Structures are given as C-alpha cells and as structure tokens.
Image (tube, helix red, strand yellow):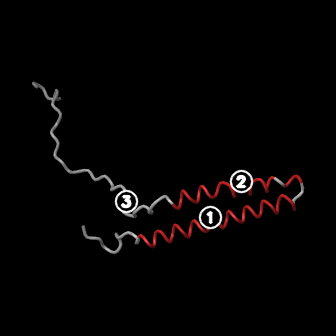
Amino acid sequence: MVYTVTDARKPLSEDIMYRERRYLIMMGIRALCFLLSILFAFALPGGWRWLAVVALIGSVVLPYVAVIFANGGREPESGARFAPYEAKDVDRKQISGPRDEIGS
C-alpha cells in the first residue's frame, strides 16, 4: 500500500507527545482545583462553600479522566470514515406476475 502525504498517520512520537501534553495540562487543572478548594473553604462565607466542594470533586475526578485520555491510544485516522453508498447501475429483471394486457 502506498501512502500519500495527506493519508499518512502522525508519527508515534508526535502522538505520544500530544497525549503527554494533554495529561500534564489536565493535572495542572487538577492542582488548581485542589488549591481553589482549600482557598474557597476558608475564604468564602457559608453559603458559597459549595464551590469548594465542586472544586474538590474536580480534583478527585480529573486524574481518572486524564489517565483514560492518556492511555486511550492513537487518534483515529482521518480516512477512517464510511464510504458513501453508491448504487450500481444494474439492469434488473422485471418481476413476473399478471400483466395489464388483454389475453395474458
């Protein structure tokens, strides 16, 4: 099989670098959520402390999501689409049965 430039997949090293970068960004967001949860817990009045809980939940859930995305494998190929259906021009036989002619 011969690949053209537009059909070739990204190199594996580039794909790994992309997944590592995405993982590190998500872990940075996790650290920010954890720090915000501590800040919100001590700085906000009682009615707004739910923000601290939301930030804490984000810091607990994000590592799982980040690992799933990092280990998900290579990105799908751009050519991995369904080919459109193209009907073939085939002369079909007529269905046999009564005809609308007299004497048939």
Residue lying furthest left in this view? 103
Per the image, the residue denoted by label 2 is 57
Q: Residues within 10 Å of mark 3 (few under 14, many from 20)?
A: few
Q: Is residue 7 left or right of residue 72?
A: left
Q: Quick check: 103 above or below 29?
A: above
Sequence-first disc among 3 and 2: 2
Q: Is residue 14 left or right of residue 41?
A: left
Q: Which secondary structure, mark 2?
A: helix
Residue depicted at 33% across the width and 55% down the height: 84
Q: Residue at x 84, y 58 (%)?
A: 41
Question: Where's the N terminus, which quadrant?
Answer: bottom left
Position of 45 with respect to 81 (left or right) is right
Where is residue 31 shown, x and y percent of the image? 70, 65
| Residue depicted at 18% across the width and 33% down the height | 95
Question: Whole-percent x and y of residue 10?
Answer: 41, 71
Residue 104 horizontal/vertical position (percent): 10, 25
- Residue 81 appears left or right of 63: left
Q: Earlier in the sequence, mark 3 or mark 1?
A: 1
Nearest to the eye among marks 3 and 2: give it.
2
Amino acid on which disc 1 is placed: Met
Q: Position of residue 49 (x, y in %)?
A: 83, 54
Give the number of the disc on residue 80: 3
Spatial CA distance of label 3 from label 1 is 28 Å
Q: Which mark is residue 26?
A: 1
Q: CA distance from mark 3 to mark 2?
A: 36 Å
Are there few (<14), some (14-19), or many (20+) residues within 10 Å of tag 2? some
Q: Amino acid at mark 2?
A: Ile
Snapshot quadrant of residue 13 = bottom left
